Image: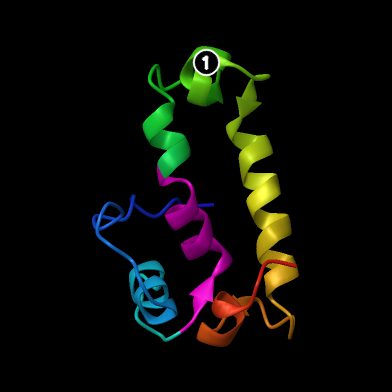
Amino acid sequence: MAWLSSPASAQARVETTGDYLQRMDANGDGRVSLEEYLAWMSYAFDAMDANGDGVLDPAEQPGGKGTPITRSQHIARLTARFQRQDVNHDGFLSATELAAPPQ
């Protein structure tokens, strides 16, 4: 899977579902694909992975504790979350699905 670049505005204030949709929707089609979701939701992992090895070691995690988390594990968790939020199972998240509480 080709990775989209990190959201340039990831640090910008996001206050509404429309803000999330606009920032996550890299191609501007009004919905969020799994690839767009993964790119947006992975910026924090990438920022914490100080040595760039694709693994968050305990020292790279908040509080310096925890078990190592691989990028593959992180992506698998995000994919499962995306699939739960995609209630109509069309492979995209709409503004309504983004606004819904996590399943």
Vertical side of 98 occupied by 4: above or below: above
Q: Which residue is nearer to you in this view: 66 or 46?
A: 66
Residue 51 appearing in the image: yes
Could you tell me which residue is drawn at 36 percent across and 75 percent down?
27
Could you tell me which residue is drawn at 65 percent across and 76 percent down?
91
User: Which residues are drawn in magenta?
Assistant: 31-43
Q: Which residue is nearer to you in this view: 2 or 63?
A: 63
Q: Amino acid at mark 1?
A: Gly
Q: Quadrant of residue 58?
A: top right
What is the image's colouring?
rainbow
Q: Which residue in the structure is indicated by mark 1? A: 64
Q: Quadrant of residue 9?
A: bottom left
- 24 sits left or right of 94 in the view: left
Q: Is residue 45 magenta?
A: no
- 22 sits left or right of 75 in the view: left
Viewport quadrant of the C terminus? bottom right
